[in-house]
Image (cartoon, rainbow, N blue to C red):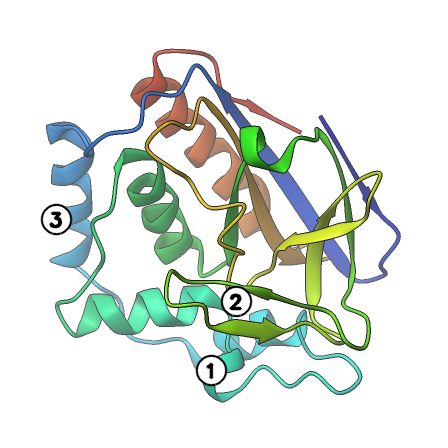
């Protein structure tokens, strides 16, 4: 598992999980989420601006529907609509909420690759991100592509339908995005690795 990163000012962490059994969150994780939602801190505008900055590039502006996914999670939590999807995604969303960092989750079976690149989207690139066929334009947006084809799969706003976790997923990698030197990145990686080790019953590894 590797990820090429030639971008200045951007750090990423990978959390690999293998031997996945996709299903609802267990009682322990569900309780952790409930406790977190019952004790939400005040919104940190400075932190929000910091995280948005890693997306701001060229024509891409992280506003409106282009905000990082962690902002949607924070809003959903405050509105009592925090999503519950499956154990893998719920654990990721909990860590994203705690760290205020966007995190992608890539189904490795669908990606058919274990080598990825962190880059900015090129003019004309897009992919479908939901079951209704809506697409997101990727020009200048921070994204992860699968090598050797260099095919875009995920970004801090919306992951592609191809890369999303499915009922038959057996292995996946989470990509945590952060600004260079962000102290939340190693903490988020360690926490997500811990949750995935417990949920999957198989060692999760960070890199």
Q: Is residue 178 above or below residue 22?
A: below
Q: Is residue 126 above or below residue 192?
A: below
How far, Cα to Cα, is label 3 from label 1? Answer: 27 Å
Q: Is residue 19 above or below residue 26?
A: above
| Quadrant including the N terminus | top right
Classify mark 2: residues with Cα within 10 Å, few (<14), some (14-19) or many (20+): many
Going from N to C along the chain, the mark reached first, 2 or 1, is 1
For the residues labelled 2 and 1, say whether their Cβ atoms are less than 8 Å apart.
yes
Classify mark 1: residues with Cα within 10 Å, few (<14), some (14-19) or many (20+): few
Q: Nearer the viewer, mark 3 or mark 1?
A: 1
Q: Nearer the viewer, mark 3 or mark 2?
A: 2
Going from N to C along the chain, the mark reached first, 3 or 1, is 3
Q: Which mark is residue 50?
A: none
How far, Cα to Cα, is label 3 from label 2? Answer: 24 Å
Q: Which residue is mark 2?
A: 157
Q: What x and y, as percent, mark residue 84? A: 20, 49
Indicate the secondary structure of the residue bearing disc 2: loop
Q: Which mark is residue 65?
A: 1
Indicate the secondary structure of the residue bearing disc 1: helix
Query: Which residue lies at the image location 40% right of the left edge and 19% below the top edge?
Result: 197
| Quadrant including the C terminus | top right
Q: What x and y, as percent, mark residue 4? A: 83, 42
Indicate the secondary structure of the residue bearing disc 3: helix
Q: What x and y, as percent, mark residue 3? A: 76, 38
How far, Cα to Cα, is label 2 from label 1? Answer: 8 Å
Q: Which residue is mark 3?
A: 34
Classify mark 3: residues with Cα within 10 Å, few (<14), some (14-19) or many (20+): few
């Amino acid at each position: 598992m590797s990820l090429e990163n030639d971008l200045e000012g951007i750090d990423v962490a990978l959390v690999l999980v293998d031997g996945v059994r996709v299903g609802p969150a267990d009682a322990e994780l569900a309780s952790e989420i409930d406790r977190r939602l019952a004790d939400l801190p005040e919104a940190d505008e400075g932190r929000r601006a910091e995280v948005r900055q890693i997306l701001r590039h060229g024509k891409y502006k992280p506003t409106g529907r282009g905000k990082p996914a962690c902002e949607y999670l924070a809003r959903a939590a405050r509105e009592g609509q925090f999503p519950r999807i499956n154990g893998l995604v719920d654990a990721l969303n909990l860590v994203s909420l705690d760290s205020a960092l966007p995190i992608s989750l890539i189904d490795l079976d669908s990606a058919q690759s274990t080598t990825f690149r962190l880059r900015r989207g090129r003019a004309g690139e897009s992919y479908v991100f939901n079951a209704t066929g809506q697409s997101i334009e990727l020009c200048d947006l921070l994204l992860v592509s699968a090598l050797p084809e260099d095919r875009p799969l995920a970004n801090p706003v919306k992951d592609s339908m191809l890369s999303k976790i499915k009922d038959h997923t057996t292995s996946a990698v989470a990509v945590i995005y952060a600004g260079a030197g962000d102290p939340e990145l190693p903490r988020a990686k360690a926490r997500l690795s811990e949750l995935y080790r417990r949920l999957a019953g198989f060692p999760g590894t960070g890199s």
